[in-house]
Amino acid sequence: MPIQNVVVNCTDVPRSVEYYTRFLELEVVGEVTADRAVLDAVTATIELRVVPNGREHSTWSPDDLQKGFRHIGFKVDRLDERADALKAGGVEFKLDPLNAEGNVRICFFYDPDGTLLELIQGDLRYAEVLDADGVARERALGVPQRPRFDHVAITVEDRDATSDFYHRHHGFDFIGTIEQPHDSRGFHIGYLKGGDTVLEVFTYDVPKTARDPQLDVAGFAYAELAGDVPDLPVQIAHDETKVYVDPDGFAYAVGSDGFAYAVGSGA
């Protein structure tokens, strides 16, 4: 079962709509208000919600040793051309385009309120394939005609425990791994696939830090998954949504088996 929706808090909804539609070619679904907008990202929706507290109130850190949410990833074509457009538009980058482990090209940058985003070009060549059918389904999605939501990345303490939890409750399958042999921290990545979307799971051999989710500050708020209601701590969002917090501080809500909003189709 896929990631259906990703809620991103922002301080100015129309500004964020302009950003995501201009640079990521997401398409507006329904009405844009000062409080909320929903954007079609092909395989999921990105929901923008206004909050009073900006980036300066967030405890989120770009250091991937902080557990919980790390970034939102989009599969693209023409990555370097898109990165040039982002830079020409004054967008802040964390990592310029480069060729990465797994035979893909990537870059990292921030949205107007500090949410970290990634562009990925190419099909991953896994260090170890654990589910050949899952990898085949991923590659069958093809080259995106416009940027396509691909994954949410999280840092966790125990990848096997995370894989077991999200498989049992939300139907994600562990399809493969990527190793980062040049990272002195002992950096390992696992890919948990649900539908056409992925939880990208980071683990490290060195100590990590913890963070409690913040549903009232700018940046990533929570994802919406299909599946069972888990036995986890709960926070309540502004719209009364129950948001569950997993052992590593990743926040998510549980939706229906279908998509929360009508989304596009095709590559």
Image: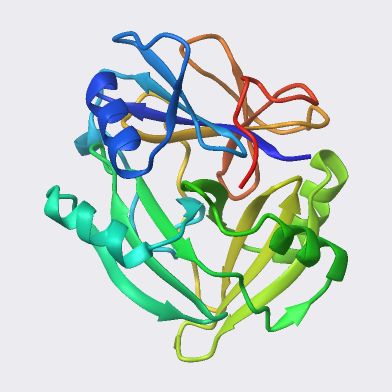
> Along the line of sight, which residue is nearer the eye, 209 or 124?
124
Percent of width and height locating residue 253: 64, 27
In the drawing, does residue 237 fall left or right of residue 131? left
In the drawing, does residue 92 fall left or right of residue 154? left
> Along the line of sight, which residue is nearer the eye, 158 or 221?
221
The quadrant in which residue 126 appears is bottom right
In the drawing, does residue 90 fall left or right of residue 178? left
The residue drawn where x is 83% and y is 55% is 164
> Along the line of sight, which residue is nearer the eye, 112 or 206?
112
Q: How is the image coloured?
A: rainbow
Q: Split into 4 quadrants, where in the image is the N terminus?
A: top right
**Residue 131 seen anywhere in this rendered image of the structure:** no
In the drawing, does residue 192 fall left or right of residue 75? right
The quadrant in which residue 79 appears is bottom left
The residue drawn where x is 33% and y is 29% is 217
Percent of width and height locating residue 5: 58, 31
The residue drawn where x is 64% and y is 53% is 199
**Residue 122 seen anywhere in this rendered image of the structure:** yes
Q: How many marks?
A: 0
Depicted 87 relative to depicted 183: above or below: above
Percent of width and height locating residue 252: 61, 33
Depicted 213 relative to depicted 139: above or below: above
The residue drawn where x is 34% and y is 36% is 20
Percent of width and height locating residue 196: 70, 47
